[in-house]
Amino acid sequence: MVEEFAARRDLVVEGLARIPGLRCPRPAGAFYVFPDVAGTGLDGATFAERLLDEAGRLRPAGDGLR
């Protein structure tokens, strides 16, 4: 399983690294990755909202967006 998780991690990191404006350091142990979106000119919250909006997943809620 360790090899399989490493392969999955590498796939995600390499895929994110191909997106213009993103940097994604390879984590040493865990599968979790935290891409740096600074190169897009957006802060993390704005990037996440735009990503979700473009994917059609943001839905209006009484207290904001979900």
Image (spheres, helix red, strand yellow):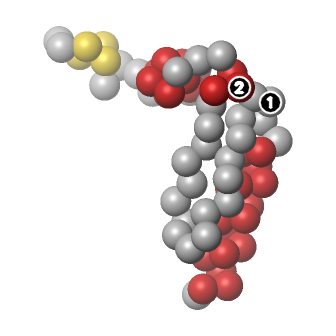
Residue at label 2? Answer: 39
Question: In the orientation shown, which residue stands out farthest toward the left?
Answer: 62
- Total labels: the figure holds 2
Q: Quadrant of residue 51?
A: top right
Verify CB contact (< 8 Å) between mark 1 and mark 2: yes
Amino acid beneath label 1: Pro
Name which of mark 1 and mark 2 comes first in the sequence. 1
Kindly identify which numbered label has been placed on residue 20: 1
At horizontal 71% and vertical 25% (from top left) the residue drawn is 39
Which tag is nearer the camera, tag 1 or tag 2? 2
Screen quadrant of the N terminus: bottom right
In-front residue for pair 11/59: 11
C-alpha gap between disc 1 and disc 2: 8 Å
How many residues crowd mark 2 within 10 Å: few (<14), some (14–19), many (20+)? Answer: few
Screen quadrant of the C terminus: top left
The image shows residue 57, relative to residue 35, as above or below, that is above
